[in-house]
Image (cartoon, rainbow, N blue to C red):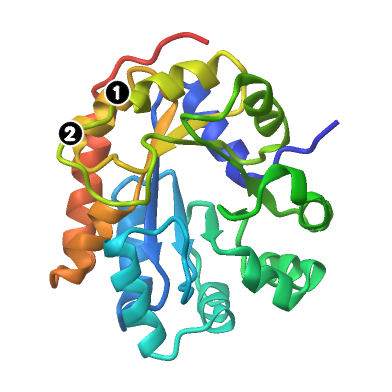
Amino acid sequence: MTTVGPLEERLRARRDAGGKLLVAYVTGGMGDDWLDVVHAVADAGADAIEIGIPFSDPVIDGPTVQEASVRALARGTTPASILAALSRTEFGVPLAVMTYYNLIFRAGHRRFADSLVAAGVAGAIVPDLPLEEAGGWSEEADTAGVETVFLVAPSTPDERARRICARSRGFVYGIGVMGVTGERRHLAATARQVAHRLRLMTDTPVCIGIGVSNPEQAAEVCTEADGVVVGSALVRKLLDGGGPAAAGAFVTELRAGIDAVESTPR
């Protein structure tokens, strides 16, 4: 029997109590106040926070997150510096890192998993590591107690989506629209479609990200999904000069938007 970790436990508890889930993304190390931003986002009502580890060659990040990563790398940010900073503070909500497999491979599966646990990080999202090649990492992550969140795209066939759902820990990350991360003026129809399809396949919480940019879109997605992941729209506010207060205010708006959605029974 698979042990449920703190990330999934937190998300399941809110969902099962009738609430909708909010996972917020913050790029680690993008400014001197990035830890204050994480605190503000947690205090504003995020159920979990995704910490982006900057990488020089991302495959899923759009222009907004890329710009934040460039800023972070220019400041000398490294995976080790992010994890060291996280290890020195408590946020009151589970954390997951978003990283690329190159960094995990370079560090070594066991060493990277152990470093996450030592920093108080509950989960890992590795978008360029497909299910079929994830065995080595997933086994070490499970042993260390790291919940690996897998992604399902709108184009993923049902049979493969079921296998991804069965292997995903923490939550299942449904991709709302084909393409890279970024703000969209309109919510893609595929966002609700993916949510509906996945919720029929799994009892693991289903959160939809990529293309969810404002409280209205978040609420619309949550008519089908258990929750949302919001990243680029939040990072854009930080890049435009907003600090912890602006980040917290935006998350408060997102929280109010999804809290207005009536939860549908599973």
Residue 130 is left or right of residue 31, and the answer is: right
Q: Quadrant of residue 8?
A: top right
Percent x, y of residue 101: 64, 64
- Structural crowding at the residue carrying mark 1, measured as other residues with C-alpha within 10 Å and reported as few (<14), some (14–19) or many (≥20): few
Label count reads 2
Q: Is residue 40 above or below residue 111?
A: above
Q: Are marks 2 and 1 in contact (CB under 8 Å)?
A: no
Residue sitting nearer the eye, 132 or 145 = 132
Residue at 73% across / 65% down in the picture? 113
Residue 207 is left or right of residue 150, and the answer is: left
Q: Is residue 194 above or below residue 238?
A: above
The residue tagged 2 is 186
Q: Of the residues shown, which amino acid type is indicated by label 1?
A: Ala
Query: Rounded to the nearest whole Å, what is the CA distance between mark 2 and mark 1?
Result: 9 Å
Q: Quadrant of residue 4?
A: top right
- Structural crowding at the residue carrying mark 2, measured as other residues with C-alpha within 10 Å and reported as few (<14), some (14–19) or many (≥20): few
Q: Quadrant of the N terminus?
A: top right
Q: Can residue 194 be seen in the rendering of this structure?
A: yes
The residue tagged 1 is 189
Percent x, y of residue 83: 57, 75
Q: Quadrant of residue 109?
A: bottom right
Q: Secondary structure at mark 2?
A: loop
Extreme top residue here?
265
Residue at 28% across / 63% down in the picture? 63
Percent x, y of residue 93: 48, 52
Q: Secondary structure at mark 1?
A: helix
Residue at 66% across / 47% down in the picture? 130
Residue 156's label in the rendered image is: none
Percent x, y of residue 202: 62, 21
